[in-house]
Amino acid sequence: MNLSWIELLVLSLASFRFTRLIVDDLIMEWLRKPFMKITSHTNERGEQEEWIEPNGWIGEGLSCHWCVGVWSALLMLSIYIFIPYGYLLNILLAVAGIQSIIYGLSRRYL
């Protein structure tokens, strides 16, 4: 299989966005929550803080960008190869990935 540079870029950005969706985004908290341990602590200023820690190997896997990234890349590539019009999902996630990068940069530098 030969991938052009643009196909590789789209798949990379789609995988990046899907990984962030699973690991970080609030909308997927329902997926991570059963595998996370939440504890509350009072800090030195008397404020309540919540600590979220992975619980077990699934929790570790769902909180690891590297781990989810590998599975995300496999999924994006499989969708691209095996599902008719699956490239549309990859393009959608790639555009969302670019938006995510721009948003992150704008918050940092603007």
Image (cartoon, rainbow, N blue to C red):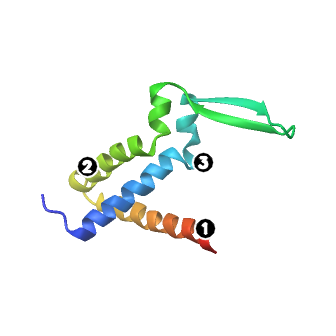
Q: Residue at x 33, y 45 (%)?
A: 70
Q: Position of residue 61 (x, y in %)?
A: 44, 35
Could you tell me how far apart the alpha carbons at marks 2 and 3 are, in whole angstroms? 26 Å
Which of the 4 image quadrants contains residue 11?
A: bottom left
- To which residue does mark 1 refer? 108
Residue located beneath label 2 in the image: 78
Q: Foreground: 72 or 30?
A: 72
Neighbours of disc 3 within 10 Å: few (<14), some (14-19), many (20+):
few
Q: Residue at x 29, y 46 (%)?
A: 74
Q: Nearer the viewer, mark 1 or mark 3?
A: 1
From the image, tell me which residue sits under label 3: 26
Marks 1/3: CA distance?
21 Å
Relative to 60, say whether 78 is above or below.
below
Residue under the point 50% across and 39% down: 63
Could you tell whether 20 is left or right of 110 in the image? left
Q: Secondary structure at mark 1?
A: helix
- Give the amino acid type for the residue marked by disc 2 in the picture: Ser
Task: Point out the residue furthest to the top here.
Answer: 56
Q: Residue type at mark 3?
A: Leu
The spot of residue 32 in percent (x, y) is: 54, 36
Query: How far across and down, in percent of the image, does residue 57 sit?
Result: 45, 27
Q: What's the amino acid at mark 1? A: Arg
